[in-house]
Amino acid sequence: MRAFLKSIDRRGLAGLPSVTIMHAAMINPSKPLRRRLALIATFAAMLAAVLTQAALANPQHPGMPRGQRHESRHEIFQLEETWRDALLKGNTAAMDSLLADDYMAITDSGILQTKEQTLANLRSGKVRLTALDISDRKVRFYGTTALVTSLAEVQGTTPEGNISGSYRFTHVYARNAQGKWKIVSFEASKIREPGEHK
């Protein structure tokens, strides 16, 4: 019988009936390989446990219960209206309360603006908007961060000149230690007709 098994398992390493050649490394892995395999298995088990827990908490939006997400969306929409109103009325106090201290804006022409520069432009009247109609607003949450995109029809001027036209706006909100949403980033992209230049 032993001779028969050895004839099937040509290398005679496993002592098991087989029609394939058994490799020594797979039957009796070295200690470093066994350690690596054990580490990989441990990491995979930990990752599976974390993902399962997150999926059970909220299968569609891990990290934020559905009720809280609805409440936060409503709050973000109100803040967006406060931001719009502050721009139209030149209300620097309202804008100051909305923007995080490390706020950074990217204008349509690629210029960076800090919170201080944004407030100074609004205070001086260099930013003057006569119309700001927002539509197609969408809010997505990533833990304590909210990403807001919208379509805007703008009439007005800034230090860069006349900015009237159609834009895509992006706001990034972060919830601070006090639980308040603050705008940390803003970007404007002008929608241009085919063949239209800057």
Image (cartoon, grey):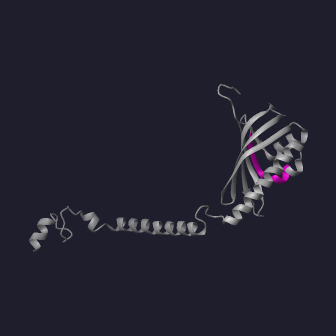
* Numbered marks: total: 0
Task: Using residue 28 as the reference point, say whether residue 70 is left or right of it.
Answer: right
Q: Residue 15 occupies which quadrant of the picture?
A: bottom left
Q: Is residue 121 within the magenta segment?
A: no
Q: Is residue 103 within the magenta segment?
A: yes
Magenta span = 95-106
Q: Nearer the viewer, residue 39 or 5?
A: 5
Q: Is residue 128 visible?
A: no
Spot occupied by residue 83 in the image (x, y as percentages of width and height): 82, 48
Q: Is residue 34 visible?
A: yes
Spot occupied by residue 81 in the image (x, y as percentages of width and height): 81, 50
Instruction: Specify the farthest residue to the bottom.
Output: 1
Q: Residue at x 21, y 70 (%)?
A: 14
Of the 4 image quadrants, the one containing the C terminus is top right
Task: Using residue 26 as the reference point, say whether residue 40 is left or right of it.
Answer: right
Q: Residue at x 62, y 61 (%)?
A: 61
Instruction: Specify the farthest residue to the front.
Output: 135
Q: Nearer the viewer, residue 176 or 25?
A: 176
Q: Residue at x 65, y 25 (%)?
A: 195
Of the 4 image quadrants, the one containing the N terminus is bottom left
Q: Residue 39 occupies which quadrant of the picture?
A: bottom left
Spot occupied by residue 93 in the image (x, y as percentages of width and height): 89, 51
Judge whether 24 appears above or below 98 on screen: below
Q: Residue 90 occupies which quadrant of the picture?
A: top right
Q: Main secondary structure of the magenta part?
A: strand
Q: Residue at x 79, y 37 (%)?
A: 154
Spot occupied by residue 31 in the image (x, y as percentages of width and height): 34, 68
Task: Using residue 107 as the reference point, say whether residue 56 is left or right of it.
Answer: left
